[in-house]
Image: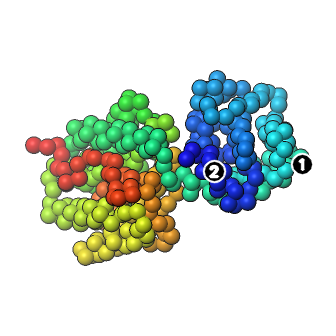
Amino acid sequence: MSAISRLRDRMASEGFGAVLVSDPVNVGWLTGFSGTFGRVLVTSTEALFITDSRYVLQAQEEVTDMPTASFASPVDGDVFVAEQAQKLGIAELGFESATTTYLQWQKTAEKMGSVRLKALPDIFSELRMIKSEVEIAKIKIACGIADAGFAHITRMIQPGVSEIDICLDLEFFMRRQGAEIAFPSIVVSGNRSARPHGKPSEKKLEVGDFVTMDFGARVDGYNSDITRTVVVGKATERHHEVYGAVLEAQLASLEAIRAGAKAKDVDANAREILGRKDLAKYFGHGLGHGLGRVVHDGGRLSPTSTDIIAPGQIWTIEPGVYIEGFGGVRIEDDVLIKEDGIEILTHSPKELMVLPSA
Ligand code: ZN
Ligand code: ZN
């Protein structure tokens, strides 16, 4: 079923006859448009894409499933949207309550005339959780580029190279493959690897450092998100112990995540495994998140999650252990949930790598 049919079904069940879509993430999901200013008016029978003069040519190429109406200066965008809504006979118009700012709502409401605005629950992030074949194909390409990025960067890891240089080289490599950067890459080493979301610094790699790299590629608006941790020069028993425990939790989570499972149970299983080595106390974040047009998209694998795993969803699985004064390890893969199991979409090696390899 197309995105727009799924949206219409959901609009009907929520009691909305018409909605205005403004969030670029949702606009892109619904139409394929990749510009910054697009609006979509959707009713049970009609759909209209609205943009401004900067994007008319781009919309001709990208928005093929519905007509486009455009405006140019000095016409006001909100007034134009209101006119189009009135032409479609819309009396009440749902807006995205999750992503519309108060100011934007005020400005739009002022110009709507006879059309009443009504807050739409956050149905989009829920709808986006289930991916189409086309979306899955794009995420697979993004995962392939991230894997290639990891293979590329392992050749550079040695004492004396800085975190920021690794980051820049990795990001340049992925962009050169035609991808965008999914999010600012994390490259942290030694003590700094105990910061789960640390920023790469001028610190140079030293023998005995864990190096954690968390990065992703974006292809046609769809993201990958992968983390690998390696050791520089020589691994101690403690490195093996901590890494081994995180890997065990990660592999067990890949076994545990299945259609029908409760997200919080998958998370609890990983915590239980790390607890056996007394490491659960160092695992402060959730086990994973939904992945799609947004890197931390709808869905959480966490102790408080109410999500149920379902076919068509894509999740990250990323247990981590962060020990102040020693360092941290995180291992993250992206997985597609199928009717009868899962497909792991990232394939970079996970046995502990000591670099540079002899
Ligand atoms: Zn990540
Ligand atoms: Zn992640």
Residue hosting label 2: 7
Q: Nearer the viewer, residue 353 or 263?
A: 263
Q: Nearer the viewer, residue 115 or 90?
A: 90
Report helix, strand or loop for mark 2: helix
How many other residues sit within 10 Å of disc 1, few (<14), some (14-19) or many (≥20)? Answer: some
1 or 2: tag closer to the N-terminus: 2
Q: Residue furthest left?
A: 358
Q: Residue at x 43, y 39 (%)?
A: 138
Q: Tell me, yes or no, whether the two marked residues, 1 and 2, touch with CB atoms within 8 Å.
A: no
Amino acid at dot 2 = Leu
Task: Say what secondary structure mark 1 lies in.
Answer: loop
Give the quadrant of residue 72: top right
Residue 351 seen in the figure? yes
Considering depth in this image, is 258 or 194 the residue closer to the camera?
258
Quadrant (top left, top right, bottom left, bottom right) of the C terminus: top left
Q: Position of residue 320 (x, y in %)?
A: 33, 62
111 versus 245 height, above or below: above
Question: Would you place residue 58 above or below residue 337 in this image?
Answer: above
Side of 286 where 323 appears, left or right: left
Q: Which residue is depicted at the point 57% across and 44% down?
A: 2
Residue 192's disc number: none
Q: Using the numbered discs, state the Cα–Cα distance from disc 1 to disc 2 in whole angstroms.
A: 24 Å
Given residues 331 and 205, the one toward you in this image is 331
Residue 26 visible: no
Q: Which mark is residue 114?
A: 1
Residue at 51 percent across and 70 percent down: it is: 306
Q: Residue furthest right?
A: 114
Measuring from the top left, give residue 37's x and y in whole percent.
Answer: 67, 36
Type of amino acid under label 1: Ser
